[in-house]
Image (tube, rainbow, N blue to C red):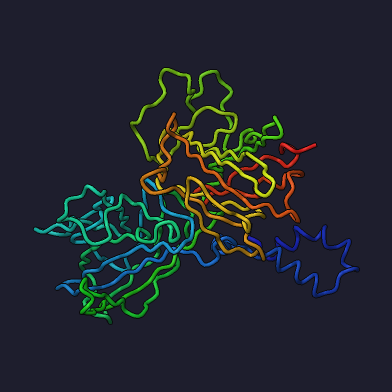
Amino acid sequence: MAQRPLSLLCLEQNKVLVSPIMSFLSKSTVLLLFVLCCTSFTSTEAYDALDPNGNITIKWDVVNWTPDGYVAVVTIYNYQQYRHIEAPGWSLGWTWADNEVIWSMFGGQTTGQGDCSRFKGNIPRCCKKNPTVVDLSPRTPHNQMIANCCKGGLISSMVQDPANAASSFQLSVGAAGTTNETIRIPKKFTLKTPGPGYTCGPAKIVRPTRFISADKRRVTQALMTWNITCTYSQFLAPKAPTCCVSLSSFHNKTIAPCPTCSCGCRRNNTVSRGCVDPKSPHVPGPGQKNTITPLVQCTSHMCPIKIQWHLKLNYKDYWRATIIITNLNYHMNYTQWNLVVQHPNFDNLTQVFGSKYKALPSLSTTNDTAMLWGIKHYNDVLMQAGRHGKVHLELLFRKDKATFTSKKGWAFPQRIYFNGDRCVMPPPDAYPLVA
């Protein structure tokens, strides 16, 4: 049977809906409904209202020509405010335009060599049509490093640690063009951090990058430069949530727990292989860490991260909230964790204890969004599940008598994000309210 056009199928599927109201709609309205029905929205059209201009830019600088190709320095810049790349780190892939190979690398490595049987004598480091590059560890020998490399794949966000918001590696490309006119630009770039979530656009030739020497007395520039822009899309990210929020207050014994099955459900068997009972004698120790697949503590919500917001005190002119972040994942130390919290009273935030703070611009007319992250060498690493897997913060707010109320859940946050992932909140009717 011949395949029917998509537009015809779309119209037929909605014929029953459109016909009864046809007499009440103008032709232009019907046309609009038809267009909306048959238009497919791609994941690249996702929009982050909390970071509308955030992206990851990959800069590919050709710095030298070789007899059969060129040497390039590739740098990954994270221009996002709060999303960062955590362990086990980034991986960058692309497809060569022709039959290019990688002869050597510094500051990074390819995950596979591919078929290099066509070469005799000197064998390239990678002959794959679509290579994937990962970062090296900080313990890499110095003769294999370049500047700004070897961070174990970790890249901080621009707000949290701008000095570590980039990562570089160098590669020597063979069987490639040797001039600006004959060079062939790679295509189909992919970026994993470490999972999916980013869509990369095509490479675009830009003005060559300028380099300033260490003594700032000499300026050189790349022979050729192209940029690749990658944007985050919630549609491409893993569907299951990774964190949940529970709420409590000093004036009410009721606790609004994380909703059941927030991040998944326990199996209906007595011995669950999907989680770890903290009372079990076989609780994992500080061994295998920083793997993509979480191994979580057995709970009703099954989330790797639990965040507790507690309304601690209500003074005459101030009120205080406590935030407790608990790591329930035995496979992950969360390096450079951060929270993004939305609350209508951040305009009146007076002091933060136990973390750093920055107001984030939002679409609201008031300051209602804040970014919180750990203090370096103090609590910037949220340790794996166990007795050390907690971080405590406190927020002191000045009380605006025109808006403040402890009733109707006003003192609780509207949304909380952990490392860029939106956390599951309790339903409003479960909030611990004042009678």
Is 146 situated above or below 304? Answer: below
Question: Which of the 4 image quarters holds residue 133?
Answer: bottom left
Residue situated furthest left in the rendering: 121
The percent coordinates of residue 204 (x first, y second) are 40, 75
Q: Please identify the quarter of the rendering in which residue 229 is found.
A: bottom left
Q: Position of residue 391 (x, y in %)?
A: 48, 39
Question: Residue most toward the front?
Answer: 316
Q: Residue at x 76, y 72 (%)?
A: 31
- Residue shown at the point (71%, 63%) measured from the top left: 37
Report x, y in % for residue 297: 49, 29
Tell whether 207 sits left or right of 35: left
Is 110 positioned to the left or the right of 255 in the image?
left
Which one is in front, 116 or 153?
153
Residues 227 and 1: in front is: 227
The x and y percentages for residue 116 are 20, 56
Question: Which quadrant: the N terminus?
Answer: bottom right
- 77 or 321, nearer to the observer: 321
The correct choice, above or below, for 242 with respect to 301 in the image is below
| Quarter occupied by residue 102 | bottom left
- The residue sitting at 28% across, 50% down in the picture is 111
Q: Residue furthest right?
A: 23
Q: Quadrant of the C terminus?
A: top right
Q: Nearer the viewer, residue 72 or 360?
A: 360
